[in-house]
Image (cartoon, grey):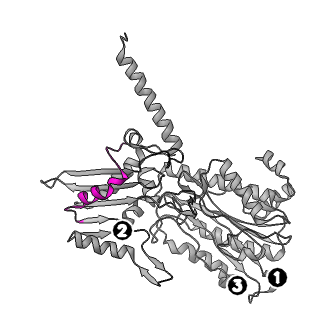
């Protein structure tokens, strides 16, 4: 007979906590209590008598019954850490009859786990309750009934309708799904106000915590390492997709779950195409290649661009344009600090490029927010400490343009990820060389590496 049941129970509890924390670290990447704090912050900003609904992203079909690799809706991922389809979260905020104390609820809906739909580690009710701290967990099939129950007597519904709009080309009909859904809800619940959760989510997500910044820095470091390997391996005669393979190999080998967006490897004439993605051209001596890439690490994206001379040496024309873009980027980065208008960053970069006579070939904005999404949410008015932005001016001169022929088929873009600090800024992506001398030096030492040498370098 065991005479020490409390001791055994204590050991069992410690073992359970150890296993739970280990699972959380591997699956979520963040301490699980952070997700509970995020939900509490969202609830705090909801008005009384309101409800918010967040639904998982729909699995996208690649061909017939095969789906693309799944990526969760960023808002739901931010609030729960759960990265599986057919999941939903309802947040409810009431006020007691005395009108003083708040009464809130967090309800999670999970798919029924069967042999047929398990595709790796899945979050079940036990994990949701014991690890994530949810008190109310239901089967996804119960969502409609529970939603209608919780929606009664509510004044505000926060919901995002996706897709909001669908166009059917054969009938040429336009279906405004979001507008129709709001109309039906108002008819069923008179007086109900339907709003997007976007404003609250933007306030929460635009300022990165220290835990988030660690994940972002890891994603950025992986991306910079991939850039370095691209510099070491690029050479005439390679196909763009060969560089893509090296880059995404570094991503996977370094622990990134997947690219944050399709890798852009544009050489020669393709360097002048901003979002070129086919990556199929054979690179030639005398080309530049624009490499715009980003790893995603536990839901957080990097976005770093470098432009290389394929043969390891910039031509005079390439060097001239590169130095203009680099100067524009440096001056724009130098201006990043709290309180500066977001659009001022672009104005500074554009002024440099226009003064050099290439303004008409700078055809995009300079910055966007970065976080869980590559083009992340954020307030496009003034910068605040904790925001992360990109700074990425560029010049793109296609063949046949009015510019001197020596500039034709040259595209230059240089992009870094920049954290707004309390006193100024910090460039998070300096690990990847961007000075001409540093790029040429690295490429000179590494031109002609075999795949075996590449693996050993790693």
Across and down, in percent, residue 202 comes to 42, 63
Instruction: Name the residue rendered at 73%, 75% in the picture.
Output: 270
Instruction: Name the residue rendered at 22%, 63% in the picture.
Output: 154
Q: Nearer the viewer, residue 214 or 354?
A: 214
Label 1 close to label 2 by CB (< 8 Å): no
**Image quadrant assignment for residue 401:** bottom right
Across and down, in percent, residue 213 comes to 53, 52
SS at mark 2 in the image: loop
Mark 1, residue position: 406
Across and down, in percent, residue 39 comes to 36, 52
Disc number lying in front (1 or 2): 2
The residue stretch that appears in magenta: 133-155
SS at mark 1 in the image: helix
Task: Report crowding for label 3: few under 14, some 14 to 19, many 20 or more residues within 10 A (C-alpha).
Answer: few
Residue 22 appears in the rendering: yes
Disc number lying in front (1 or 3): 1
Disc number lying in front (3 or 2): 2
On residue 357, the disc is: 3
Question: Is residue 135 found inside the magenta-colored segment of the image?
Answer: yes
Instruction: Name the residue rendered at 84%, 70% in the picture.
Output: 284
Q: CA distance from mark 1 to mark 2?
A: 50 Å
Furthest residue in direction left, as rendered:
98
Q: Nearer the viewer, residue 127 or 455?
A: 127
Label 3 close to label 2 by CB (< 8 Å): no
């Amino acid at each position: 007979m065991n005479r020490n049941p409390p001791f055994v129970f204590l050991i069992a509890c410690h073992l359970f906590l150890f296993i739970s924390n280990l699972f959380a670290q591997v699956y979520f990447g963040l301490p699980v209590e952070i997700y509970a704090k995020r939900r509490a912050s969202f609830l705090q900003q909801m008005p009384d008598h309101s409800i918010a609904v967040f639904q998982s992203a729909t699995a996208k079909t690649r061909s017939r019954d095969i789906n693309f690799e799944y990526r969760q809706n960023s808002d739901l991922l931010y609030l729960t850490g759960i990265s599986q389809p057919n999941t939903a979260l309802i947040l409810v905020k009431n006020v007691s009859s005395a009108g003083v104390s708040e009464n809130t609820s967090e309800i999670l809906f999970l798919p029924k786990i069967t042999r047929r739909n398990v595709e790796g580690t899945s979050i079940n009710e036990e994990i949701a309750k014991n690890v994530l701290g949810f008190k109310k967990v239901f089967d996804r099939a119960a969502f409609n009934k529970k939603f209608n129950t919780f929606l009664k007597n509510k004044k505000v519904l926060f919901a995002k309708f996706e897709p909001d709009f669908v166009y059917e080309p054969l009938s040429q009909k336009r279906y405004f799904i979001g507008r129709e859904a709001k109309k039906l809800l108002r008819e069923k619940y008179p007086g109900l106000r339907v709003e997007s959760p976007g404003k609250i989510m933007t306030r929460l997500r635009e300022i990165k915590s220290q835990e988030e910044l660690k994940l972002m820095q890891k994603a950025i470091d992986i991306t910079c390492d991939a850039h370095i390997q691209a510099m070491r391996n690029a050479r005439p005669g390679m196909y763009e997709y060969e560089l893509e393979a090296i880059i995404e190999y570094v991503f996977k080998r370094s622990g990134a779950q997947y690219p944050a967006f399709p890798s852009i490897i544009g050489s020669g004439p393709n360097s002048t195409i901003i979002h070129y993605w086919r990556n199929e051209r054979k690179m030639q001596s005398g080309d530049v290649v624009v490499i715009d890439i980003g790893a995603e690490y536990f839901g957080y994206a990097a976005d770093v661009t470098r432009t290389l001379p394929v043969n390891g040496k910039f031509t005079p024309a390439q060097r001239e344009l590169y130095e203009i873009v680099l100067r524009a980027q440096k001056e724009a980065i130098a201006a990043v600090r709290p309180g500066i208008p977001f659009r001022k960053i672009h104005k500074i970069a554009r002024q440099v490029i226009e003064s050099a006579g290439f303004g008409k070939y700078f055809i995009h904005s300079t910055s966007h927010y970065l976080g869980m999404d590559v083009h992340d949410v954020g307030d496009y008015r003034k910068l605040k400490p904790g925001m992360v932005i990109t700074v990425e001016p560029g010049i793109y001169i296609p063949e046949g343009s009015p510019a001197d022929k020596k500039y034709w088929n040259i595209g230059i873009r240089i992009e870094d990820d920049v954290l707004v600090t309390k006193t100024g800024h910090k460039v998070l992506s300096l690990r990847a060389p961007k000075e001409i001398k540093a790029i040429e030096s690295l490429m000179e030492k590494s031109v002609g590496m075999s795949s075996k040498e590449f693996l050993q370098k790693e």
